[in-house]
Amino acid sequence: MSNSNLTRRGVLKSGAVAGAGVALPTIFTASSAAAYTNEPTGGTVTLGFNVPQSGPYADEGADELRAYQLAVEHLNGEGDAGMMNTFSSKALKGNGILGKKVEFVTGDTQTKSDAARASAKSMIEKDGAVMITGGSSSGVAVAVQGLCQEAGVIFMAGLTHSNDTTGKDKKANGFRHFFNAYMSGAALAPVLAARYGADRKAYHLTADYTWGWTQEESIVAATEALGWETVNTVKTPLAATDFSSYITPILQTDADVLVLNHYGGNMVNSLTNAVQFGLREKQVNGRNFEIVVPLFSRLMARGAGENIKGILGSTNWHWSLTDAGSAAFVKSFGTKYGFPPSQAAHTTYCQTLLYADACERAGTFNPCGVAEALEGFEFDGLGNGKTLYRADDHQCFKDVLVVKGKDNPTSEFDLLEVVEITPVDQVTYDPNHPMFAGGALGECNAG
Amino acid sequence: MDAILLQILNGLDKGSAYALIALGLTLIFGTLGVVNFAHGALFMIGAFCAVTLQRLLSLSFETVDPTKTDFLGNPAKIKTPYIESWLGPETGAAIIDWSVPLAILFSIPIMLFVGYVMERGLIKHFYKRPHADQILVTFGLAIVLQELVKHYYGANPIPTGAPDAFKGSFDFGVVLGFDPNLIIYPYWRMVYFAFAAVIIGAVFAFLQFTTFGMVVRAGMADRETVGLLGINIDKRFTIMFGIAAAVAGLAGVMYAPINSPNYHMGMDFLVLSFVVVVVGGMGSLPGAVLAGFMLGILESFASMNWIKDILPGIDQIIIYLVAIIILLARPRGLMGRKGVMED
Amino acid sequence: MLGLNNKDFRFLLIVIALTMATPILLQPFPEGSVMAQFNAGYPDLMQRFAIFGIFAIGFNILFGLTGYLSFGHAAFLGAGSYSAVWMFKLLSMNVIPGIILAIIVSGLFALLIGYISLRRSGIYFSILTLAFAQMSFNLAYSVLTPITNGETGLQVTLNDPRILGQQVAANGNVPPTNLFGLEMGSSFKLPVGAWEFTFNAGYYFCAVIAILAFYLSLRIFRSPFGLMLRAIKTNQTRLNYTGLNSRPYTLAAFVISGMYAGLAGALLASMDPLAGAERMQWTASGEVVLMTILGGVGTMMGPVLGAGFIKYFENIFSKINENVLHQWFSWLPDGLENIVIWVAEHFVGSGWHLTSGLLFMLVVIFLPGGLVEGGQRIAAMFKRKKADDDSDDAGHHPKQSPHVAE
């Protein structure tokens, strides 16, 4: 969508032609001489928050939106400034971004690539958004990231966990703070081996689409490296609601661990079904049968009720962390909304701050300048310890949390407990790792 | 062998849900001649009856416990359900635990009422309208109902467990002479199957052995003649609509412990149940039940690993594939009558 | 003129005029005003109006004329998109080869599905088409990922061969889709006072094709072939008794409408080079059914109006959030403002589905002939006022006849 080529740079040329036809050349204004897509000219800057508001991830989208609103308040100097106080970079002053008041528009991705792109396009074309952020699934993130690359705006990914987002589908204009499937595997496998033994036999159920496959590939590789054996990997349809016919075959194998590479409603149902079929009570060769959910989402886990007790998984962030950044964020979010934020809320809040900070440091909203400021940026105080925005693939590298379903929750939010904080070194990989190969960032596009 | 037995059990279970929804759908179609796209929404409302009753029973008052703190560091508020303070903690907890079975009683009047209001308030005006209009209006209604539920209950699934007494599973294998733990089946799923069988039996018995049912069947066959005999067939059809809604609702209530209810579960089942009805043959009640169980079992078989190895992705399409084959082999589905919705 | 009688020709001219003026008509509110939220004159949405208009016009050729209700038309839309994107990947970013291939592929696909499905009629036909489309969707999402790129949707990348065109544009990115060099995304903005109108190359490309599609469909409606299709709808059995085999006619209608869908799919991909599997899902098939019924089955303009109506709600209402509401109602006293906003919130933003559901119901309850009937009623009101004016074309649309037989 190089909308811009004519609108901005080439406008004089085409303007002359069209102007001759329209014969009213005086009505052209200078606004089209912008240097990049949607350059903010007035006293405000518009950000586009593109989250799922309908469909299965609507609650997660709503939580992301809450975090965005909070971030905008903090950027504009309202509220208690939250993580801006603990953020290691002090470029943000609480006077908007580069002195411009932050405004935002919202849209509904419907968790469909098509609808998400339509929504993002309307933000760019109609509302003049200079940055798009959000999303709660990898398909949408990759699709919108591609669009932002073509349109020449920055994309700050929301909750997207597939390796592809910063792997084979990475883009120069796209940035991801959230962790990914490889990191889940790398963080989880040692804990699994330590707790359940290094000679386990794992049976995988995998959601049959791109994210599921990268999740399965990552966790299989990580566990096999530590001595586990993979009995079988079975793909389940995304539309499946009842997983009984995929779970019963496990009874006939000698597998002693079930790995559920599912997310959202799939995860809730497959886990509930697995527990219904007594897998938690099952004994194989004198050892307890175990269930693992590599990507845990607290919001979603609530749907599975007490079935999640004792189940290991990984997560990007959890509100029970006690570092200063997390505490400040939980406090300002909790005070405003009355409940703790989810990991989706956390990552979107961070992304907004990181974007604003990069603009301040670059001194411009120009996507190329912002990208340069984000690349290789090291920061701290946003809840995950020391973090690096790696220049090679625009992926954040930070500690990963291994969590467990809490046995005795004290409230409806207190569902997960942090078992281990896996240090960043253990989850770092080479940019050319085969699981991430096949793509290129390309050149940054300013429109 | 044991694998196949298990998949038959799974299939019976899935089939129960399909059959119950399809039964109501075909009942509405057979009596009123209305294509009801809101039928999935009725199933969803049934499941949310269970959620609502659970919430009502767990309505709590808050007391501040200064020894504990909540996530913001303020003194924690401890919630105690009223019912526990009125009837004692144990009885109260037991009642909350049994909220899903109790929701059966709770949901029947609600679903009959919902069905009645729907028929009198909306569907009634669409008997003479083209099927396309019926589809549009009921689809609109389904969206409205679904969005209202989403607004009050959120989009995430809500855990609605079976009573503790029904947790765990039964070892079929031992009964049949297999090794232990090879063929086990959860109690609640067995309850679901039994429940579905009872409901289906009751609907058939009602239509077969009561005068009311006889008149309804006569009306289904030839509405005008029955009307000319001076029988108010419309009123009876309204009641049948209520019953169909109740059947869908009960299917939903009992389904809640199997998979946590969410607001779009109705849409998930809508398309499948239409396929089931049509494969069974439009307007045929036994056809709908037969097709429901058949497709349920075939779907389960298709998800077996060795079948998937030969035909990748077969579990994704099996229902549609079977539907196509059956409709090509038998023009009016398994048991459809000639001339019903063929033009 | 153009093989049309005078009335039809006038009708066509009005349609052309409206289509060409769309960027102005859809931008009635000044920039920055409170009502600017309701402006729909930005390229993406205008393109969608035209594209889904084509989709619905094509669907109406099948449903409106023959009464066969296909619940699987989205499969052709998806097939068209995939074919077009593959052409962008393999040949060049010029949209013409993509569109041609899309029409061919979706035509063949429709021939296959139609040949099988048309052996049955009524709801049995609907379910057969639904089954085919759902199979296509489920496979495209999972097993066929090498061809469709599954969940994410098929995208163009820097590594694609594009043997006839540029592989990488000068700025290091994937080249934009174009028509012999005219970029689909390029627009020309015309500020007039407080207003700003966007004239987008892609939109006008779609609009011209939409007008051609509309013209073709007008010709089909008025042709002996169209008459034959109507006869099928009115009474197929009687037609068969006359010794006429109706199936070739229905199959032809099915294939034509499938090709329309493929064309729409290719245009979607040409405006935005991504083909998502959701385009084939039953909800997408249902959407075009809704568009057609909502607008008015069997009328020329109805499906286009229905398409515009649904896409408008999807894109405009979903974007109204609490902040916007606060801006609108800030003039109200505080307490009242909060109440109004609380009520309004149910219907906008994440509640846009609710609004569209309610509107479906209202339209079908009060306007049995769809939006076109609404237009006719308004026109009739004007007519009563100035009785001598007969230059109204709405009255000339084919009258609502019982389409799907009872």
Image: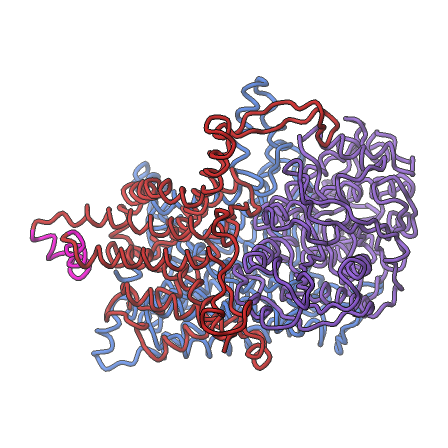
Chain colours: A purple, B red, C blue
- When asked about the image quadrant of residue C235, the answer is bottom left
Q: How many marks?
A: 0
Q: Measured from the top left, where is residue A378 in percent x and y?
A: 92, 47
- Residue sitting at x 60%, y 61%: A279
Q: Is residue A129 visible?
A: yes
Identify the residue shown where x is 45% and y is 67%.
Answer: B9
Front-most of residues C221 and B3: B3
Residue at the (28%, 53%) spot, across then down:
B129
Give the magenta part as a residue range: B212-229
On screen, residue A375 versus residue C270, left or right, reads right
Q: Is residue A228 above or below residue B248?
A: below
Is B221 one of the magenta-colored residues? yes
Q: Is residue C312 left or right of residue C394?
A: right
Residue farthest toward the left in the current orientation of the protein: B229
- Is residue C14 shown to the viewer in this render? no
**Is C164 a magenta residue?**
no
Can you give x and y, in whole percent of width and height, for residue A141 in the image? 71, 55
Residue B296, how many percent across, how many down?
Answer: 43, 67
Q: Quadrant of the N terminus of chain A?
A: bottom right
Along the line of sight, the residue nearer the viewer: C284 or A421: A421
Q: Main secondary structure of the magenta part?
A: helix
From the viewer's side, name the closer residue of B149 and A296.
A296
Q: Is residue B111 above or below residue A203?
A: above
Q: Find residue C74 and report its horizontal and vertical position in percent.
A: 51, 65
